Image: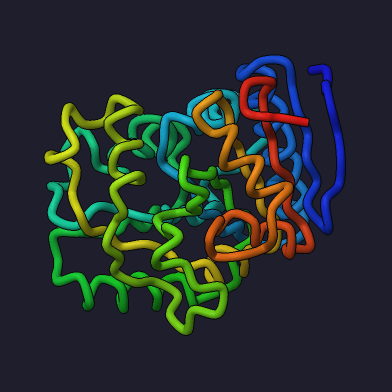
Amino acid sequence: MSVVTEEILDGLRVRVYPTRDEMGRAAARDVADRMRGLLASQGRVRMVFASAPSQNELLDHLVRAEGLDWSRVTAFHMDEYIGLEPDAPQSFGRFLRDRLFDLVHPGRVHLIDSTRPAGEECERYAALLAEAPVDIVCLGIGENGHIAFNDPEVADFEDPLPVKVVELDERSRQQQVNDGCFDTLDSVPRHAITLTIPMLLSGRALFCVVPGPTKREAVRATLRGPVSPECPASVLRRHPDCTLYLDADSYEA
């Protein structure tokens, strides 16, 4: 896995790989190495995963990583549409079950249940997250710079809530169509439950995987623009242990 470019911006490590597969393999190797180290020193590892096609290569390689005792992993995901049935093809919980959880069988999996009253579900999920620190967060960046479903209009770097209900902006919803998850913009739900930015940043180590030309603008704003809610992902530059994995299509020097 050859790195085309490597740089550090503020505290953010940036690594660029020639292909999407090499990017995903490198990220999975680093996540697995961190998991092994933690499992050697503590009883359980608590992880949060993003659900999006941009994460496919990371998840594919992580499933095949050797020497991981997944029975000692507690897994969460970072967002979910409100109103979708849990087995709907577009459900983020189902995405992770299909791509990861049903293949490696973590000891505990906590999924957001968006069929419950949204406020109650936010409180329930926040309580689960608060039981112990989060060790690892595997995330991506949206076309509008969002992390989880913290779009620019609702992103709050000092958010007092760990989990909240948000209204999705049109660009975020259009990305779901561009990704092939929905056929039309009107079919994309308008509201979701999301982990907030402080909750995501509370993870001890963050591994952010962002491939493809549609993410180039967001990556540029993350790396070259001000740290601002106008590009929520720019806050990753403030985290003490975050690595951003890019491919040649998503990176612009």
Q: Quadrant of residue 6?
A: top right
Q: Residue at x 39, y 71 (%)?
A: 163
Q: Provide residue 46's location: percent of width, then percent of height.
A: 56, 59
Q: Can you say whether 59 is above or below 18 in the image?
A: below
Q: Is residue 66 visible?
A: no
Q: Name, please, the residue furthest toward the bottom.
A: 160
Query: Horizontal and vertical percent for residue 77?
Result: 42, 53
- Which residue sits at x=41%, y=41%? 51
**Above or below for 107 versus 209:** below
Q: Residue at x 83, y 58 (%)?
A: 10
Given residues 168 and 94, the one toward you in this image is 168
Q: Please state if 141 lies on the left or on the right of 83 as rendered.
A: right
List x then y, in percent, for residue 181: 27, 30
- Residue at horizontal 34%, vertical 31%? 98
Residue 124, quarter of picture: bottom left
Q: Nearer the viewer, residue 97 or 91?
A: 91
* Residue 31 shows up from this direction: yes
Is 244 displayed left or right of 158 in the figure? right
In this picture, is 11 found above or below 177?
Answer: below
- Classify the position of the C terminus by image quarter: top right
Above-or-below relation of 230 to 187: below
Q: How is the image coloured?
A: rainbow
For the N terminus, the quadrant is top right
Q: Is residue 120 left or right of residue 53?
A: left
Of 214 and 14, nearer the camera is 214
**Number of disc labels:** 0
Q: Nearer the viewer, residue 30 or 235?
A: 235
Which x, y percent locates residue 146? 48, 52
